[in-house]
Structures are given as structure tokens and as C-alpha cells.
Amino acid sequence: MRQTVGQIGAAEGRSARRPRRLGPATLLPWVGGARQVDAGARDRPRARTRVRAMFLSDLHLGTKGCQADQVLSFLRAHEADVIYLVGDVVDGWALKGDWYWPQAHVDVIDELLRKARGGTRMIYIPGNHDEFLRDYYGTHFGGVEVVESCVHQALNGRRYLVIHGDLFDVVITQAKWLALIGGKAYDVAIALNTWFNAARRAFGMPYWSLSQWVKLKVKNAVAFIGAFEEALAAEAARREADGVICGHIHHAVIREAGASHYLNCGDWVESCTAIVERFDGTFAIVRWAEETAREAAERAEVEAVPALRQAK
């Protein structure tokens, strides 16, 4: 039986072997009772935008590449009736090696929990990097529902399969060792991207993803993205859905893929993007790093006016 926003039940049968070190109690602070700071108690700006639904994926909390400050400012600036966490929110692969869980990552979790306590429905669909949670389909942690996949019904009546997408990536399903090696190379690319953007900031230039640009210039990567989109669109059609909303490949896009509507949330390591459904039933990509950089430039311009007047 298909799952919908109103009817989410047990998993469809796939599950991962439970790792010894990782689990909700060790990785999700609200379950383990080890919350350090209640981000909800801090001052925050009034929410600027209310939307019907938000879709975020590939935050990769637990890695140095995660732009947690951007995630937090986005969450504080938006409210939604339902939030879908579309996989790779917590990076269990990275945490198995070196434990990295700074305060900024705690604050992101706290903000999500604050929203759940405030009445926002929170649906967590694990991906390959947080596959340890696939043992917990059908359960709730701190008001967060954990499911394998579900169907979101948009305001216009169209039905969207919501799924992380790694099960349609042949590297993940057939050669996980290769994915792990690729993950290390990706970490190096992200580190280079961080240094590159630090230099841009020093010259007053906005954020720009070097790693994303390189990826889209590589012919094989472009071919992989196209094949991935086609596979997900076909799966949506197989499940009699009108479209699919996914993550996994860190490439935010909204487009028609044959008879299906294909939407990818992007990520919060490189591009800092999310998908939102507005109250008129339309979907949009929010490019948060670009938006905040533009606002910062506008503020700097306004603040510079009095100084220029005084100089005259």
C-alpha cells in the first residue's frame, strides 16, 4: 500500500545491518538526552517566509564540509506545515571514523526539534550516509517520523514520490567500496572549495561552488546525473506518482523528465539549496547561500551611504 503524508506506516522491507557504534541515541542528541544548548531559547529573527512544505537533503551533519550556519539561518527564516528530511542529514559514514559534532550542528538539530514541538510535521527519509536509521522505519524520535519513502500530495493534487535516491545509484548498490573511496576524494574537493571561498570572501566576492562547477564540467558526471534523473522519474511512474522529489547527487534542479516532474533538493555542503512548495501549489528552489550573500551586499551598500555623505 502506498504511503502518503496522511498515511505513513511501516517500511517496504529494505533494511541495513545495524552498526555497533551508531544509532539514534548516540547521534541524535534529543534521544540521548544530551542536548547541550537549546537553540530555541536564543534570539532569532521573525520567520520571513511561510511555505506549505520544505524538502532538505544532504546536510551531512557530522562533517567539516557541512555549512551548518547556513542551514540554521535558513531554518530560522522559514516555517512550513511539513518538513521532509530527504536523507544524508547525519553523516554516519564520517562519524564512524572521526567524531565531529560541533555546537553549530547541535543547533541545527535543536532548531528542527523546536519546529517539531511547535506543530510542524517532520518526516525523515534516511539515505546511504545515515543508513543506520533504516533499522528504525515506522518509529518516531523526538516527534520525527522515520520512513523509507512516502508520497507528498501537492496543493494542485499532483502526487510526488519522496525518496533519497541512493538505491538507484549503481555505485552505491553494487560497489560500496568505490563509493567510500569517492567520498574521500569528495572531502578533498570540499576542503579546496572552502579555501577557495575564503579567498573570495577576503576580496568581498560572494560564495561560488568550485567543486560543483568542476563536477558539471566533467562529461561522465553529467551523464551520471542524467541517468539518475531518468531512473528516479521511471520509479515515480512505476509507483503511479506524478513526480519525484529526491536528493543524493548534490544537484538542485526542477524539470520535467518525460511524463514525470523531477525535483532534486541539492545539498548543504556545496550549493546550500532546498525545495519549497508555496501555498499556490508551485515548487521552487531556494538558493540560500546566494540569497544571503545578495542581502549582505545590499545591507553593506545601505550602511555605506551615510559614510559617503559625510565624506562629501
Image (cartoon, helix red, strand yellow):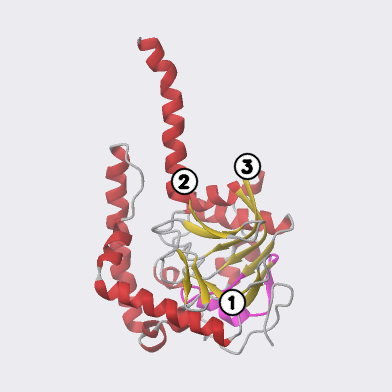
Residue 76 vs residue 253, the one in the foreground:
253
Mark 2 → mark 1, Cα distance in angstroms: 30 Å
Cβ atoms under marks 1 and 3 closer than 8 Å:
no
Mark 3 → mark 2, Cα distance in angstroms: 23 Å
Q: Is 40 placed above or below 307 here? A: below
Q: Residue 5 magenta-drawn?
A: no
Residue 172 vs residue 22, the one in the foreground:
172
- Indicate left or right for 279 with 165 as reference: right
| Dot 3 alpha-carbon crowd within 10 angstroms: few under 14, some 14 to 19, many 20 or more | few
- Residue sitting at x 58%, y 52%: 75
**What type is the residue that disc 2 sits on?**
Glu
| Pointer 3 or 2: first along the chain | 3
Q: Under tag 2, what secondary structure? A: helix
**What type is the residue that disc 1 sits on?**
Asp
Nearer the viewer's eye, disc 3 or disc 2?
2
User: Looking at the rendering, in which quadrant would you find the C terminus?
Assistant: top left
User: Looking at the rendering, in which quadrant would you find the N terminus?
Assistant: bottom right
Mark 1 → mark 3, Cα distance in angstroms: 41 Å
**What type is the residue that disc 3 sits on?**
Arg
Q: Is 136 placed above or below 60 here? A: below
- Residue sitting at x 34%, y 72%: 183
Q: Disc number at residue 242?
A: 1
Q: Disc number at residue 291?
A: 2
| Dot 1 alpha-carbon crowd within 10 angstroms: few under 14, some 14 to 19, many 20 or more | many
Residue 98 pos. (x, y %):
40, 66
- Whether residue 37 is visible, yes or no, is no
- Indicate left or right for 126 with 170 as reference: right
Question: Magenta region: which residues?
Answer: 124-143
Q: Disc number at residue 42?
A: 3
